[in-house]
Image (cartoon, rainbow, N blue to C red):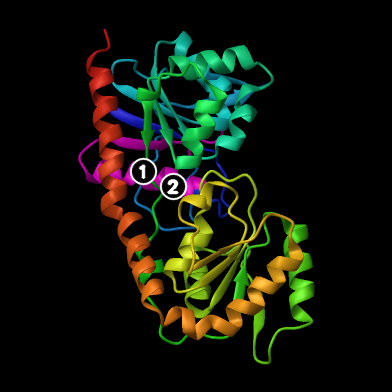
Amino acid sequence: MEIVYLSPAVNIPIGGIKVIYRHSEMLNEAGISSSIFHPDDASFSCNWFNHNAVIRSGKRKWFRKKHVMYEKKPFNPKSDFIVIPEVWANQIGAQCIQRKLRYGIFVQNGYMIHQGGKKNIPLLNTVYEKADLILSISEDTTEVLKLSFPNLNQNKICRVIPNIAEAFKDQCLSKKKIITYMPRKLTRHAEMIHFFLEQSLPEGWKLVAIDNKSEQEVVALLKESSIFLSFCEAEGFALPPIEAALAGNLVIGYTGEGAKEYFKPPIFTEVHCGDLINFIGSVKNSINQLQLIIGSQAYQEQLHHLSEYYSSENESRLLLEFGRRAQQILNQTD
């Protein structure tokens, strides 16, 4: 039995792909066979972060042509459980149904569910209803799933949490007057905030963009900075803000909705998307209150809670529940 995660062959920093790799790694570590398969390029392997994931290639080569997946050798319906990204739901889910492959759908962003429909919503409903399991990355994603598919059997939904690499949790005692942010999403907002802040930052403070960096480089920058600006919109979870928080930053900005489950004061200050004036004011206030906040008991208690809840132990526990359910489903396959 093997749980096969399908993933795009994209070698730029994308948190969702890192989560997919991490899932597969952890299942293998727990004794449940798992691999990563990149349909667009069977020989591909991400190298912008360190991993020990098994890359499934050679024996089974799939390739896409005109939005149809062709395969030279089929997966085994009796031993392979396929995990499909939500954006490929119709494209690959329909083929799994046709070939009697057991499958799950990994929804890391509920706001992208419709993109998996390829304008064929009746098929999308069928693909989700016939899925054996559905992995949900956050409380918000689960609610979006219920909204999208009112008739969906909710017992199929498996809540999982993303991995926060331990490297982010090692606190740095020599923090600098640096404000970091990632401009890749909502670039226009990031550019405007950067411009406005540059005009009025206190002496010694500077803004540093984190863009197209390796995981090690991101960790290093977040450990140096004191404040992180969150620019995200319609996100299933939003990984960078919590990584920044665990690296010792106060976080100001947008939740993308998915981050609302952890975006609480005193560490986090939510700003409604597009409210740039309040955004600037919140940053200035955090600079003025920085030492007071990080020295408070409330700050330490929240940091401890985040570290405990979004721990590798909790992640592993939830993931193994999914793995065991997938095993049981395959054992019932005729």
The tag on residue 59 is none
Given contact means CB atoms under 8 Å apart, are the residues at marks 2 and 1 in contact? Answer: yes
Q: 229 above or below 70?
A: below
Residue at 62% x, 44% y: name it.
Answer: 234
- Counting from the top left corner in percent of width and height, residue 69 is at 56, 21
Residue at 55% x, 27% y: name it.
Answer: 147
The tag on residue 19 is 2
Residue at 25% x, 25% y: name it.
Answer: 327
Region of the chain picked out in magenta, as a range:
16-43
Q: Helix or strand or loop: what does disc 1 sit on? A: helix
Q: Of 291 and 115, which appears nearest the observer?
A: 291
> Which residue type does callout 1 highlight?
His
- Counting from the top left corner in percent of width and height, residue 309 is at 33, 55
Residue at 41% x, 45% y: name it.
Answer: 21
User: Looking at the rendering, which quadrant does residue 180 occupy?
Assistant: bottom right
Any magenta on residue 29?
yes
Q: 125 above or below 263?
A: above
Q: Of 280 and 51, which appears nearest the observer?
A: 280
Could you tell me which quadrant the N terminus lies in?
top left
| Residue at the disc numbered 1 | 23
